[in-house]
Image (tube, helix red, strand yellow):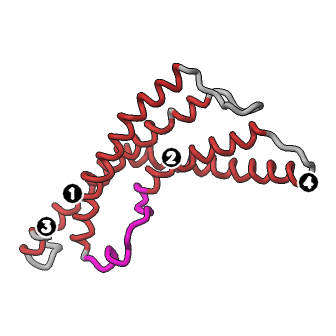
Amino acid sequence: MIDKSIKYLGYFTAFILGFLVLLVVYDASARYIFSSGSVALQELEWHLFDVVVLFGIAYTLRENAHVRVDIFYASYSKKKKTIINIISSLFFVLPFSCMIVYIGIDFVALSFAQNEASSNPGGLEYRFLVKSLLPISFAFLALVAINEAYKDIQSLRDATKSNEFKDYNEAIEL
């Protein structure tokens, strides 16, 4: 269920990215061809970019398309890669995500309480809605980290049971 939800979140993010591209083209054309622009449009671009980045994080982890130091990782065995993925999911991604969610809730609550809006004349109202995406997106990331760690642990168990590793000692040691 997590995989399916994150897949649709990725589709939503791709749609927002397409809309963002069209909006930037329109805004740049209006500014340079017709010498007119809008602060609200520029802020909407920033907000949509926030949506793309924040929701894209979980989808990227799910698709295993995130950045890592591949010069080392590529040469590792399948077992070592799986163990590194488990460790990174459980001890790096998950705690960091939980910390951002925990801190982000107060950040968003303060923004809601202040009914935060843009300080720019002609800017967008309801900035607190965009800020609320921060803990939501990292909650999605935490779910993906748990799901990926679970799948990797299952993969490691299955490989050990089916003797996929060359010998028993390789399956136990790092």
**SS category of the residue bearing label 1:** helix
Earlier sequence position, callout 4 versus callout 1: 4
Q: Is residue 171 above or below residue 89?
A: below
- The answer to whether residue 150 of the structure is visible from this angle is no
Is residue 71 part of the magenta span, yes or no? yes
Identity of the amino acid at label 4?
Answer: Ile
C-alpha separation, residue under disc 4 versus residue under disc 1: 56 Å
Identity of the amino acid at label 1?
Answer: Ile
- The answer to whether residue 157 of the structure is visible from this angle is yes
> Of circles 2 and 1, which is in front?
2
Which numbered marker is on residue 160?
3
Identified at 87% across, 54% down, the residue is 32
- Mark 4 surroundings within 10 Å by alpha-carbon count, few (fewer than 14), some (14 through 19), many (20 or more): few
C-alpha separation, residue under disc 3 versus residue under disc 4: 64 Å
Which numbered marker is on residue 54?
2
Which numbered marker is on residue 153?
1
Q: Which residues are magenta?
A: 61-76
Identity of the amino acid at label 2?
Answer: Leu
